[in-house]
Image: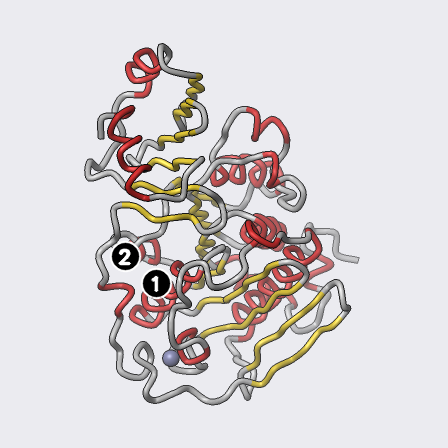
C-alpha cells in the first residue's frame, strides 16, 4: 500500500499518479477567502495543488468563524487580513504548496494581472460585481473558472471554460440592481451550505485539471442543505449574442473603478484611494489616538470613533463600517486619514 500523503487521492482511478502530477503542476487563483474561498483553499492545498494565489480585501472577524474553518479567534482579535491568515494556516497544512496571499480587492485595474500565469480560477466572491468582472477577464484571457455562490441553505456551482461552455453572462445576462438579491449579510448563511458549495467547486476544479474535459451538455449543480435537495441542471448551449463570449465586449473589464462602493447588506462602504499607498501607519495612529480607539499591526490600521469603524489597508483602501452612504464614507476617510 502506497503511503505517500496523496495515496487516498491517487488510488481513486480517474486521478491516479498522472492526474496527481497535473494537480501538482496547477496554479490556481482564488478570488475571495470567505465562506467559499477559505474552504476551497484548504481543499486545494490538501489535494496538493502546486500554487495558490489567494486574494481577499478584508480582515478576519468573529462572525466569520461560524463557517470559515481556516481562521480562529486570535486572527479576529488581532485583525489579521484573511489572505494572510489563510496563507499562515495553509503552510502548516501542506508546506509543499506555494501560497501567495494578496490583500487587495479585485477590480478592473488589477484583474488581468491577477490572472497572469494562472491555469484556473475558483470563485470565492460574495457579490455579483466581482463575478461579472472575473467572467470578462477570464473569457478575454481564455482562462477557465469555477463559479460558486451560496446564501442561506442554498447554493450553485458550475465550470466555465471559455469557448467550450456557456460563460457566466450566457447564464446571467445582466448585473442585478444593487440590493435586489439576498446576500449572506442580509439573510444569513449556514456553514454546511458554504462547505458543500466549496466542495463542489473543488471537485470540478480537480476534474478539470486532471481530465481537461467539460460535461456535455454543460451542467450547473444546485443544492439546498435544509431541504436536502441536490439538482443537476443541464445548461443551454453558448449564446452567440452573449455580449461577453459571443460579441467579445468586455463591459465590466473596461468600466473604470468607482471611488467608493457600498458593501450590500453590511452597513459598510469600500473607499478606494487615489493614492496608490496608505500613509505611514505609525504617524497616523499617533495623531488619531486623540480622536478614538486605534489598533495597528503590520497589515492594517483600524480606527473606531462611534458609530464608525474605519479599517485602512496598505494599498490605500479603507473599509468604513457604520454607514451605507458612499459620500459620508468618503468624507470620513478624508477627515481622519487625509486621503
Ligand atoms: Zn457568454
Residue under the image location 35 percent in, 51 percent down: 106
Identify the image quadrant of residue 177. Answer: bottom left
Between 183 and 24, the one nearer to me in the picture: 183
The correct choice, above or below, for 73 with respect to 148 in the image is: above
The correct choice, above or below, for 120 with respect to 299 in the image is: below
Which residue matches tag 2? 108
Residue under the image location 61 percent in, 51 percent down: 39
Q: Residue 133 carries which label?
A: 1
The correct choice, above or below, for 54 with respect to 89 in the image is: below
Q: Earlier in the sequence, mark 2 or mark 1?
A: 2
Locate residue 268, reporting x and y percent.
43, 41
Image side of residue 314 versus residue 155, left or right:
left
The correct choice, above or below, for 182 with respect to 216 in the image is: above
Real-space CA distance between mark 2 and mark 1, rounded to the nearest whole angstrom:
7 Å
Q: Residue 99 carries which label?
A: none
Q: In which quarter of the image is the N terminus?
A: bottom right
Between 229 and 334, the one nearer to me in the picture: 334
Kindly state the secondary structure of the residue where label 2 is placed: loop
Image side of residue 41 versus residue 227, left or right:
left
Q: In which quarter of the image is the C terminus?
A: top left
Amino acid at each position: 500500500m502506497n503511503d505517500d500523503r496523496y495515496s487516498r487521492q491517487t488510488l481513486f482511478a480517474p486521478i491516479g499518479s498522472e492526474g496527481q502530477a497535473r494537480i501538482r503542476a496547477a496554479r490556481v487563483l482564488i478570488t475571495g477567502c470567505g465562506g467559499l474561498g477559505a474552504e476551497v483553499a484548504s481543499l486545494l492545498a490538501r489535494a496538493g495543488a502546486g500554487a495558490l494565489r489567494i486574494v481577499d480585501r478584508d480582515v478576519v472577524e468573529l462572525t466569520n468563524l461560524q463557517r470559515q474553518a481556516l481562521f480562529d479567534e486570535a486572527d479576529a482579535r488581532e485583525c489579521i487580513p484573511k489572505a494572510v491568515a489563510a496563507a499562515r494556516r495553509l503552510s502548516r497544512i501542506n508546506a509543499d504548496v506555494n501560497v501567495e496571499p494578496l490583500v487587495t480587492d479585485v477590480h478592473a485595474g488589477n484583474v488581468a494581472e491577477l490572472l497572469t500565469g494562472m491555469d484556473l480560477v475558483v470563485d470565492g466572491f460574495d457579490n455579483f460585481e466581482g463575478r461579472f468582472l472575473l467572467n470578462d477577464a477570464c473569457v478575454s484571457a481564455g482562462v477557465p473558472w469555477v463559479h460558486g455562490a451560496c446564501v442561506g441553505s442554498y447554493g450553485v456551482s458550475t465550470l466555465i471554460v471559455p469557448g467550450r461552455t456557456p460563460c457566466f453572462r450566457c447564464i446571467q445576462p445582466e448585473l442585478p440592481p444593487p440590493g435586489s438579491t439576498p446576500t449572506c449579510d442580509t439573510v444569513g448563511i449556514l456553514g454546511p451550505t458554504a462547505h458543500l458549495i466549496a466542495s463542489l467547486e473543488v471537485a470540478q476544479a480537480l476534474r478539470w485539471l486532471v481530465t481537461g474535459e467539460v460535461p456535455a451538455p454543460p451542467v450547473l449543480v444546485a443544492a439546498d442543505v435544509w431541504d436536502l435537495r441536490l439538482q443537476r441542471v443541464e445548461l443551454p448551449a453558448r449564446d452567440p449574442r452573449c455580449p461577453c463570449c459571443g460579441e467579445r465586449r468586455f463591459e465590466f473589464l473596461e468600466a473604470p473603478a468607482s471611488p467608493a462602493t457600498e458593501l450590500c447588506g453590511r452597513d459598510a462602504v469600500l473607499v478606494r484611494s487615489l493614492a496608490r499607498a496608505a500613509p505611514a501607519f505609525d504617524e497616523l495612529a499617533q495623531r488619531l489616538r486623540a480622536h478614538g480607539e486605534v489598533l495597528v499591526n503590520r497589515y492594517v490600521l483600524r480606527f473606531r470613533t462611534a458609530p464608525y469603524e474605519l479599517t485602512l489597508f496598505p494599498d490605500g483602501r479603507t473599509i468604513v463600517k457604520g454607514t451605507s452612504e458612499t459620500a459620508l464614507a468618503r468624507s470620513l476617510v478624508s477627515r481622519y486619514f487625509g486621503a
